[in-house]
Amino acid sequence: MTITALALTNSLSHEPVMLEECLSALQVQLGGRYVDCTVGGGGHALAILEESSPGGQLLGLDADRNAIKVAEARLKAHKKDVILVNENFKYLENICTRYGYSPVNGVLFDLGMSSLQLEEAGRGFSFRQDSPLDMRFGDKQVLTAADIVNTYAESELAQVLYKYGEERRSRQITRRVIEKRPLKTTLELAQVVAEAVGGVHGRIHPATKTFQALRIAVNQELENLELALERALNILGSGGRIVVISYHSLEDRLVKDFLRREAKWCICPPGMPACICEHTPRLRSGSSKAIKPSPAEVQANPRSRSARMRVGERI
């Protein structure tokens, strides 16, 4: 079985996270035009196309070339209504311009790791199997996790772990990494992190936050998300919805701050005697609190436990 065929088989066995909530938040309508910025295995995309048929259209983006192949196979029945592009979502607005694909009725971001990426050998996202320290979402990228681990100065590496992993023990982990490098594989790094903090205790492996931090840094996830949210807003038609599913506090905080800022009349710094920003609201927040998966979904799909959905509507 080919990698793509295996990935498709796996993708069909994984339910997309918060699917019904996603369709409701997007307010999917017949003949609507939608963008899935992280098309992955195509689960959300397929449901959007089925809900918007006849006449619905979908533009799917993914930095991962394998994900595009899997989505292409899964969405085959809707081929005439789908455009799939192997590109990072930070280029969203340019891609929509290229294909004449705006305004749109909804934009979806399902952030974080896909099950396909975690399970695919050689990608380096997980320490459940030994792989090279890669962690790139797309093969167009140059920087790898190995580059960061083995070449960054001690203070720079510690800052990556603290900023992107919210790792309180970043300095002691970094000191141990510096002593042991070069490190080439995921299991080597996981072992070094465990040694640095006194071994593996409890259900969560001590290297979890380190791996999160490196993945975010390699793929510039927060910087690209900030750019993409702004560009998604630019292509939304009036009443269009932006829906974001995030999986950790850094992403969720960034999304929440963006939605709040774009719902305000003034975004001047506190203490200004008068408003000089001339900002006008462009969004109406769909909910004051993040939407969480149901207990039934968490039980059926433990991966959804940390998911948080936020919604904004273009005005």
Image (cartoon, helix red, strand yellow):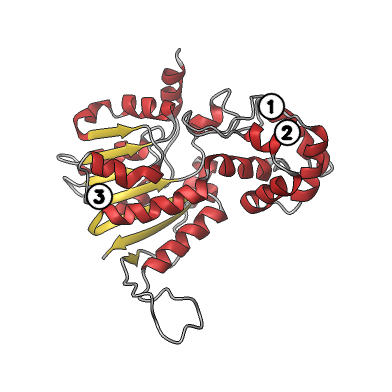
Residue that badge 2 annotates: 189
Q: Amino acid at mark 1?
A: Thr
Tag 3 or tag 2, which sits nearer the N-term?
3
Quadrant for the C terminus in the image: bottom left
Question: In the image, is residue 128 above or below residue 95?
Answer: above
* Residue beneath disc 3: 28
Give the camera-side residue of 107 and 24: 107
Give the residue furthest to the top. Answer: 1
In the image: residue 207, left or right of residue 277 = right
Residue drawn at x 46%, y 48% is 224
- Disc 2 and disc 1 in contact, CB within 8 angstroms: yes
Q: Which mark is residue 185?
A: 1
Cα–Cα span, label 2 and label 1: 6 Å
Q: Position of residue 294 (x, y in %)?
A: 46, 52
Which quadrant would residue 179 be assigned to in this image? top right
Q: Position of residue 92 (x, y in %)?
A: 34, 45
